[in-house]
């Protein structure tokens, strides 16, 4: 049986020193939730349990930091955590906690992705769906989310700013450059052709 001699704060961690000379770190949340304090005796089994709790909490904290930057899909968070070499059991536990807390929601993420694309970099319904599949979103969720995308509206939004930067003295060059730009955003020939012709007329007036 070892006794805790000191608990020294270091950022989000506490450095724990024992009277047998051993030291280890715990996340603050773990130390607080377990009521750890100087003078307390801890068995070897207790120490192992604390270290396991700590491993789980570190993984959860890493996941919340990822989500603080922007919303992410469940698959995306899982892959990022595994790349950081967290144990699979800790990753699954963290994902379950996040879902229970409403912090990990693939439908909400897919809607965020669609709306963000629509506002800042419009894509076709097809390409938006492809990007969501790459993020690990389920097919039925993708179908529900992309149904709200109107390609004829999105293609015009995508083309307008780009068209204003192109030369207006050569229609064939204008059509080729703008068409290639819109193809890269997943739009089909029909909506591209109509949009290019429309913008050429608008910008020539």
Image (cartoon, helix red, strand yellow):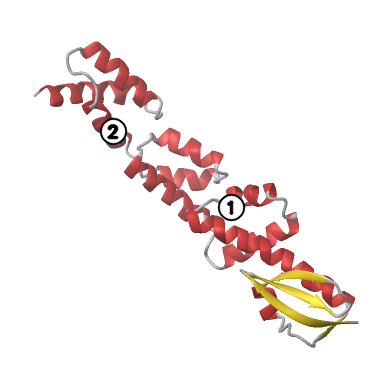
Q: Residues within 10 Å of mark 2 (few under 14, many from 20)?
A: some
- Residue 123's x, y, as percent? 38, 35
Q: CA distance from mark 2 to mark 1?
A: 31 Å
Q: Which residue is mark 1?
A: 74
Residue at screen point 72% across, 81% down: 34
The secondary structure type at the circle numbered 2 is helix
Count the numbered circles shown: 2
- Residue 204's x, y, as percent? 12, 22
8 versus 52 height, above or below: below
User: Closest to the observer: 80 or 25?
Assistant: 25
- Residue 96's x, y, as percent? 64, 63
181 versus 114 height, above or below: above
Quick check: can you spot residue 24?
yes
Q: Quadrant of the C terminus?
A: top left
Quick check: can you spot residue 188?
no
Q: Quadrant of the N terminus?
A: bottom right
Q: Nearer the viewer, mark 2 or mark 1?
A: 1
Residue at screen point 62% across, 69% down: 12
Residue at screen point 58% across, 63% down: 98
Which quadrant would residue 17 be assigned to in this image? bottom right
Which quadrant would residue 61 be assigned to in this image? bottom right
User: Tag 1 or tag 2, which sits nearer the N-term?
Assistant: 1
Q: Which residue is mark 2?
A: 152
The secondary structure type at the circle numbered 1 is helix
User: Closest to the observer: 85 or 104?
Assistant: 85
């Amino acid at each position: 049986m070892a006794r805790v001699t000191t608990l020294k704060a270091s950022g989000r961690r506490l450095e724990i020193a024992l009277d047998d000379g051993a030291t280890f770190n715990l996340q603050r949340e773990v130390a607080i939730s377990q009521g750890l304090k100087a003078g307390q005796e801890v068995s070897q089994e207790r120490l192992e349990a604390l270290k396991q709790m700590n491993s789980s909490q570190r993984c959860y904290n890493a996941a919340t930091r990822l989500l603080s930057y922007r919303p992410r899909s469940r698959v995306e968070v899982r892959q990022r955590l595994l790349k950081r070499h967290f144990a699979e059991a800790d990753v699954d536990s963290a994902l379950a906690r996040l879902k229970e807390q409403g912090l990990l929601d693939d439908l909400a993420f897919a809607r965020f992705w669609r709306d963000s694309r629509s506002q800042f970099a419009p894509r076709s319904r097809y390409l938006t769906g492809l990007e969501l599949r790459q993020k690990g979103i389920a097919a039925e969720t993708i179908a529900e989310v992309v149904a709200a995308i109107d390609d004829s509206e999105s293609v015009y939004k995508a083309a307008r700013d780009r068209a204003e930067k192109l030369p207006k003295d050569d229609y064939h060059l204008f059509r080729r450059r703008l068409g290639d730009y819109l193809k890269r955003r997943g739009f089909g020939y029909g909506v591209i052709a109509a949009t290019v012709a429309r913008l050429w007329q608008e910008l020539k007036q």
